[in-house]
Image: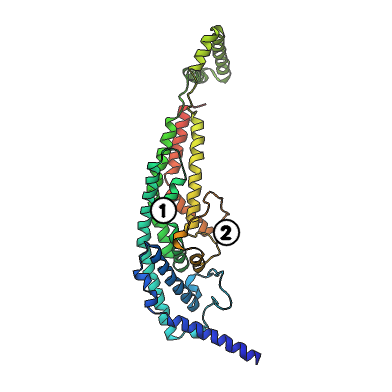
Amino acid sequence: MQVQAANQKLLRNELESLLDICAITADDLQALKVAPLETASGLEEIESALVTLYKAMMKIDSSVTGPEPRKSEDAGMSEPQTSLNSDYGKMRIVQEKKEMYLSDSRAFLNRLGAFISRQFDAAIQETKSAIASALSKKVDYRNHDAGRQLLWKYSPLVLYAREVSLEEWNRYLLLYQEKSIILYRPEFKDVLDAWKRNARKPAGEESELLFTAQIEKQQEGTMATARRVTVKRSQTLARSLGRPLGEGAKANSDKVPDGRSHPYEIFAGIMDDLLPLVEMEQNFIVDYFHATTLETADFPDLVAATRPRDRQGGDLKRHRLMEPDRELARRVTRAMESIFSFLEQDLQNLILWVLSQDPL
């Protein structure tokens, strides 16, 4: 009797699950077509319909979300996330429902792609405005928060795309990386130019010693050069000591670099400014596009965690753990190489500029 009762309970759960799947109508998913993505209320309607669609597709065939779907943290015995019995899955009504759900899902992802492309443009424009209106022209990562704040509320939808259609998810990432170049290229150029304007010019005496040493090195060899440079520096020191005390102090005060930096200090300052921005951008891509296998929450979890208007990103300055999925890590790397494709040449030009300004 216990075995019979257990079997009956299992059969009842299967039938209830089958009825839940078949009971979903086109009206239940209408929000995916007509609800506005721009408003918080419309986004909540869409996410509610998507959760219903997601769970139904998971029950029909869990492979829809990939070979290893994420487990929902709130899934318990009362709401199993496993697929239907294979015999039920072969029923004509179940197959018809599956095709309908997949069709609705594809239509929504196409709609989302067009919308999120516009949101990327708006976010980049918001960031540009924040940079342009900043009182200080120094690098401030908070300028990028203005644009990213427009995007965070759509992060669960991006996870839905990743779980249901990697092709669409990859298309969103391609859109983002293509548009982000427009933001970072001029921003980094302005940073480089601002730092270079603050460079200290070599003093006349330093230049004389440097270039005299270089010519003599070519003509007479290393030892002769060292001897002559030493003589010149001794003569310079003697002239300084021969001056009256006040005159020497005045001459030295004239050579104070008035707050300007050496070229090598310029290079170090630029690296300190730009590298954190690059790392934060990579962390944003990982978090926003859920490009990690270390995240355990699935789409329904993420929707239930916070309402759209309350969603914010995490600490992008925090170093992330190495991604164990190397193929996914390479995808993030390719995105970063695309966004900052100009950076390698800019840094090479910067190095050449530093050497030309101060060969020592």
Asked whether the residues under the numbered discs 1 and 2 touch, taking CB atoms below 8 Å apart as contact, a structural biologist would say no
Please tell me which residue lies in front, 142 or 21: 142
Q: Tell me the number on the disc at residue 324.
A: 2
Q: Which residue is drawn at 45% across and 24% down?
A: 201
Query: Considering only vertical position in the picture, is 145 above or below 359?
Result: below
Q: How crowded is mark 1: few (under 14 residues within 10 Å), some or many (20 or more)?
A: some
Residue 4 drawn at (x, y percent): 62, 91
In terms of image quadrants, where is residue 188? top left
What whole-number distance in Å separates the C-alpha atoms at marks 1 and 2? 23 Å
Residue located beneath label 1 in the image? 177
Locate residue 71, reporting x and y percent: 55, 70
Q: Residue at x 47, y 20 (%)?
A: 203
Q: Is mark 2 on a helix, strand or loop?
A: loop
Amino acid at pointer 1? Gln
Task: Judge left or right: residue 21 versus residue 242.
Answer: left
**Three-letter code for the amino acid on which mark 2 is drawn:** Pro
Q: Can residue 89 be seen in this view?
A: no
Task: Quarter of the image for the N terminus: give it.
Answer: bottom right
Is residue 348 something that shows in the picture? yes
307 shown above or below 19: above
Of 187 and 315, nearer the camera is 315
Q: Residue at x 38, y 42 (%)?
A: 133
The scheme the figure's colours follow is: rainbow
The x and y percentages for residue 177 are 41, 53
Q: Which residue lies furthest to the bottom in this view?
A: 1
1 or 2: tag closer to the N-terminus = 1
Q: Where is residue 37 in the image (x, y as percent from the top left)?
A: 37, 63
